[in-house]
Every structure is written in structure tokens, then in C-alpha cells.
Image: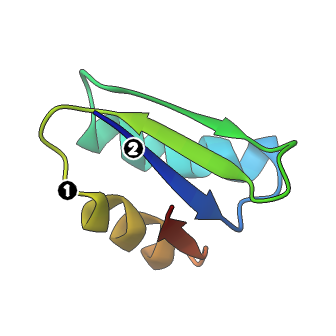
Amino acid sequence: MIHVFKTSVKSEKQASMVGTFLNILLPYDSWNFDLEDKDRILRVETIDLLPDTVVTILNSQGFECDEL
């Protein structure tokens, strides 16, 4: 399943920082940011992750995140 999130991540550096946590949480799943989109989209492809977990991770790092 692919989950799509609107975020406040603005740079590759910030995406990399968040990516460190996502890689720990999602070692076998894939994710990517589209920072050129006005909503700074994060797409996560996973089988068993709850979307609230992604929101919590980004919020704990000081970013806004809402599932679309």
C-alpha cells in the first residue's frame, strides 16, 4: 500500500534527517520525498506500517505532516 503525506520538509538536508528515522522504522519498505511539489509530498510504500506512525515521526522532528 502507498501512503501519501503532505509535509513541511523543505530541503534535501531535512529530508535526509527524516530519512534516517524512516530507514530505521522501514528497513524493507520504500519512501521518497517530492520537495518540488507545493505540498512537499512524502510517499511511503509499505505493507504493515500505520500512517499515524509516520506522522508521529515527522512531528517529533519538528515537521508538520498530514496524510492525504
> Residue 54, relative to residue 52: is it above or below?
above
Circle 2 — which element?
helix
* Mark drawn on residue 28: none
Q: Position of residue 53 (x, y in %)?
A: 27, 63
Q: Are marks 2 and 1 in contact (CB under 8 Å)?
A: no
Q: Position of residue 57 (x, y in %)?
A: 39, 65
| Residue marked by disc 1 | 50
Corner quadrant of residue 27: top left
Name the foreground residue: 15 vs 47.
47
Q: Quadrant of the N terminus?
A: top left
Name the foreground residue: 42 vs 24.
42
Asked whether residue 61 appears in the rendered view, the answer is no
Q: Position of residue 11 (x, y in %)?
A: 82, 50
Residue for point 36% across, 59% down: 54
**Residue type for callout 1:** Leu
Which callout, 2 or 1, points to the residue nearer the camera?
Answer: 1
Q: Position of residue 34 (x, y in %)?
A: 73, 38
Alpha carbon distance from label 2 to label 1: 13 Å
Residue 11 is left or right of residue 32, and the answer is right
| Residue marked by disc 2 | 22
Name the foreground residue: 46 vs 62.
46
> Residue 43, relative to residue 51: is it above or below?
above
Name the foreground residue: 34 vs 21.
34
Residue 2 is left or right of residue 14, and the answer is left
